[in-house]
Image: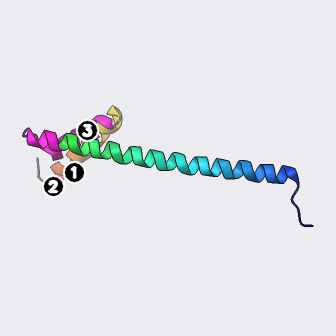
């Protein structure tokens, strides 16, 4: 008879349960991510409806998320390039 040892069956069951748990967690988080994305889109739509420039808001949010030192370095490089091109 081709029967697996009890320990292997238990290990297989545990692995299957872990795999199922991981998949379900990722699916739940993906749904939450979609909900959050929808909420963010609604906030930007509200801002636009109140006369704010959404592109500028997104740029400000991106800047605020940067490390201050990195932001200063990026701004210095950008300013240097703009001066070289006669844009300032």
Q: Characterize the local packing of mark 2: few (<14), some (14-19) or many (20 or more) Cα atoms within 10 angstroms.
A: few
Q: Which residue is mark 3?
A: 61
First in sequence, mark 2 or 3: give its number.
Answer: 3
Looking at the image, the residue that sits furthest to the bottom is 1
Does dot 1 land on a helix, a strand or a loop?
helix
First in sequence, mark 3 or 1: give its number.
Answer: 3
In percent of width and height, residue 72 lies at 29, 36
Q: Alpha carbon of mark 1 to alpha carbon of mark 2: how far?
A: 6 Å
Give the answer, above or below, for where 57 lies relative to 4. Answer: above
Looking at the image, the residue that sits furthest to the front is 1
Does dot 3 land on a helix, a strand or a loop?
helix
Kindly check if marks 3 and 1 are in contact, taking CB atoms under 8 A apart as contact: no
Kindly check if marks 1 and 2 are in contact, taking CB atoms under 8 A apart as contact: yes
Q: Alpha carbon of mark 3 to alpha carbon of mark 1: how far?
A: 23 Å
The secondary structure making up most of the magenta span is helix
- Magenta-colored span: 45-66
In percent of width and height, residue 80 lies at 22, 47
Quick check: is 57 in the magenta stretch? Answer: yes
Q: Which residue is mark 1?
A: 81
Q: Nearer the viewer, residue 32 or 62?
A: 32
Q: Which residue is mark 2?
A: 85
User: Which tag is nearer the camera, tag 2 or tag 3?
Assistant: 3
**What residue is at 86 percent from the left and 59 percent from the top?**
4
Does dot 2 land on a helix, a strand or a loop?
loop
Q: Characterize the local packing of mark 3: few (<14), some (14-19) or many (20 or more) Cα atoms within 10 angstroms.
A: few
In percent of width and height, residue 20 lies at 61, 51
């Amino acid at each position: 008879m081709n029967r697996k040892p009890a320990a292997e069956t238990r290990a297989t069951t545990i692995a299957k349960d872990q795999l199922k748990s991981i998949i379900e967690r990722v699916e739940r988080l993906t749904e939450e991510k979609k909900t959050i994305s929808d909420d963010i889109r609604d906030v930007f739509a509200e801002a636009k409806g109140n006369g704010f420039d959404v592109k500028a808001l997104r740029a400000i949010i991106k800047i605020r998320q940067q490390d201050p030192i990195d932001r200063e370095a990026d701004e210095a490089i950008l300013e240097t390039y703009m001066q070289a091109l006669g844009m300032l």
